[in-house]
């Protein structure tokens, strides 16, 4: 058994509280030929054998989630359609956390849960699956000989040039020291992201909702002193600023892989915020250089989830309404002998209002883009994509021009205030439950909170998140309440009532 990493714990909480398919990561392979079913089945088994995390489940031990072997392994099944394979829920308690299915006889669909999978894992899985499929029937070669050297790509995680020796050293530093430093760093930067105005709507959602997706291609310029990832990030912030947002906050996916994890399938990613104030008189080059400095300062804390560094941070499926994911993808050559890969297959759900996923081909700068959005909030996705494309073309032509000459800036938006969200569950204005201070159950639950939080005294109306609680402390409190008091409360009820008084009121209702 191994415990979930800190970043995975919040994901596990969200998955249990109704995130739908938000954490399903599909890879779709159109096979070159009618498959040898026995060889393909064996190839799938070999990949899971090499990466046993795929064949795991999640069990609770005293409120702490740990990976355990799944109740059964993942067979290669047949399905009528792609959507049903992607949408089928994962039973996290039984596992496995991967599934393989043939659709229509010539389409192989692999879906893994984000708890055990990330963007680079797609490249690794496809390469090893293709190598295993080629090797299974090769004369004189044992199936068990298939390994990482048989085609696993040497592909860097996102973003460009972000994994440096200094970063690797930072990840290896004493965890407590890094956590303390991260608290200081984010303490001066974090604020609840404001809603963002866009043409025809406002981006507020930080929940997981049914979404729509479109794919297009972009050419990403590489400017002096900037990586393509940094140019793209600056362009996204500048575009959102031009729509009338005085301050822009986005969530950025950062790889946490170290060299020791380069060939491992798993979840090695963390989401961190990036804030900016685009001004029309600032040149793009200067604006991008400023964002670069802020990004690189945050890299030292890339392995620390924001919920551990910022006390009182409430759980959401998305850190901000707009998020950006970027990685260099493997070429189609890694799937030689197997088929053609759809690298950015959509899972049907968007976390937040807008997710932009970029997969860049090698050093060329040609990016495949998946724009995933909540159509209730981004009503003109095609227009947004066209604006971003036009801005990047203008930047490539003259990065020294002021933003106001590259873009038409509208007046700052009045209605988009910090922290607004039409799906936010927790409100400071919510009515407080009242309890009798002499109630024995109140006293026993207060004692549990004080034990878990290592904090005393705690009052019945104290908010768990204001006390520094987070997803792990919630599950530990729930587990101890069940063990010591014989009462159960759901995660949803806990999130809606994060005080001892509120918890007691739910139990008694």
Image (cartoon, helix red, strand yellow):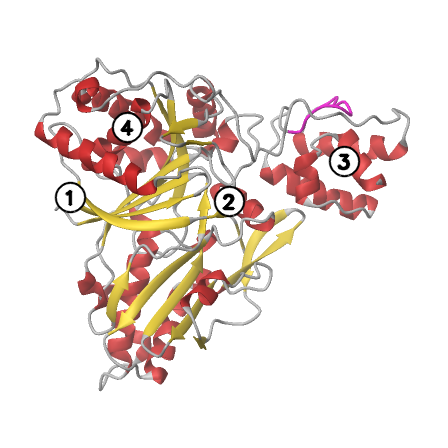
* Crowd rating for badge 2 (residues with CA inside 10 Å; few <14, some 14–19, many 20+): many
**Label 1 SS:** loop
Residue that appears at 66% across and 29% down = 464
Residue indicated by mark 1: 365
Question: Could you tell me if the residues under marks 3 and 4 are in contact, i.e. CB atoms within 8 Å?
Answer: no
Residue indicated by mark 4: 239
Q: Which residues are magenta?
A: 456-464
Mark found first going from the N terminus, 2 or 1: 2
Magenta span: predominant SS is loop
Residue 263 shown left or right of residue 451 in the figure:
left
Question: Could you tell me if the residues under marks 1 and 3 are in contact, i.e. CB atoms within 8 Å?
Answer: no
Residue 327 shown left or right of residue 481 in the figure:
left
Q: Could one spot residue 352 in this view of the protein?
A: yes
Mark-to-mark CA distance, 4 and 2: 24 Å
Quadrant in which residue 93 is drawn:
bottom right
Where is residue 482 shown, x and y percent of the image?
Answer: 77, 47
* Crowd rating for badge 4 (residues with CA inside 10 Å; few <14, some 14–19, many 20+): many
Q: Mark 1, mark 4: which one is toward the viewer?
A: 4
**Mark seen at residue 208:** 2
**Label 4 SS:** helix
């Amino acid at each position: 058994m191994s415990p979930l990493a800190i970043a995975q714990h919040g994901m596990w909480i969200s998955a249990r509280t109704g995130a739908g398919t938000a954490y399903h990561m599909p890879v779709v392979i159109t096979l070159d030929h009618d498959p040898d079913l026995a060889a393909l089945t064996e190839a799938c088994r070999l990949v899971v054998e090499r990466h046993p995390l795929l064949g795991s489940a999640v069990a609770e031990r005293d409120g702490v989630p740990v990976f355990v072997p799944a109740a059964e392994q993942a067979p290669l099944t047949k399905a009528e359609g792609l959507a049903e394979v992607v949408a089928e829920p994962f039973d996290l308690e039984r596992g496995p956390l991967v599934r393989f299915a043939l659709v229509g006889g010539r389409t192989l669909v692999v879906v893994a849960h984000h708890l055990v999978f990330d963007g680079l894992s797609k490249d690794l899985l496809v390469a090893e699956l293709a190598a295993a499929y080629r090797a299974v029937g090769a004369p004189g070669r044992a199936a068990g000989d298939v390994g990482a050297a048989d085609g696993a790509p040497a592909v860097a995680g996102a973003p460009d040039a972000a994994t440096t020796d200094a970063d690797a050293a930072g990840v290896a530093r004493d965890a407590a020291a890094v956590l303390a430093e991260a608290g200081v760093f984010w303490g001066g930067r974090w604020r609840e992201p404001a809603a963002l105005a866009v043409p025809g709507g406002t981006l507020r959602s930080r929940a997981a909702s049914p979404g729509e997706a479109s794919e297009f291609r972009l050419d990403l310029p590489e400017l002096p002193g900037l990586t393509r990832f940094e140019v793209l990030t600056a362009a996204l912030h500048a575009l959102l600023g031009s729509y009338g947002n005085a301050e822009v906050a986005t969530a950025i996916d950062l790889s946490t892989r170290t060299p020791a994890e380069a060939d491992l399938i798993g979840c090695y990613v963390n989401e961190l915020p990036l804030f900016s104030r685009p001004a029309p008189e600032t040149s793009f080059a200067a604006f991008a250089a400023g964002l670069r400095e802020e990004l690189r300062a945050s890299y030292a804390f890339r392995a620390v989830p924001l919920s551990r560094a910022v006390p009182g941070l409430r759980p959401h499926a998305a850190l901000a309404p707009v998020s950006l994911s970027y990685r260099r993808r493997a070429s189609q050559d890694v799937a030689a002998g197997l088929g053609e890969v759809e690298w950015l297959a959509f899972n049907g759900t968007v976390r937040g209002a807008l997710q932009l996923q970029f997969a860049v081909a090698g050093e060329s700068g040609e990016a495949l883009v998946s724009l995933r959005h909540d159509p209730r909030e981004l009503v003109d996705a095609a227009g947004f994509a066209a604006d971003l494309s036009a801005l990047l073309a203008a930047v490539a032509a003259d990065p020294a021009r002021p933003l106001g000459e590259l873009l038409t800036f509208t007046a700052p938006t009045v209605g988009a205030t910090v922290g607004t969200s039409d799906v936010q569950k927790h409100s400071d204005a919510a009515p407080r439950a009242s309890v009798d201070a002499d109630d024995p159950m109140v006293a026993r639950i207060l004692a549990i909170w004080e034990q878990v939080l290592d904090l005393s005294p705690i009052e019945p109306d104290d908010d768990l998140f204001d006390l520094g609680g987070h997803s792990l402390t919630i599950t530990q409190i729930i587990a101890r309440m069940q063990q010591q008091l014989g009462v159960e409360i759901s995660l949803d009820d806990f999130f809606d009532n994060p005080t001892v008084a509120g918890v007691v009121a739910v139990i008694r209702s």
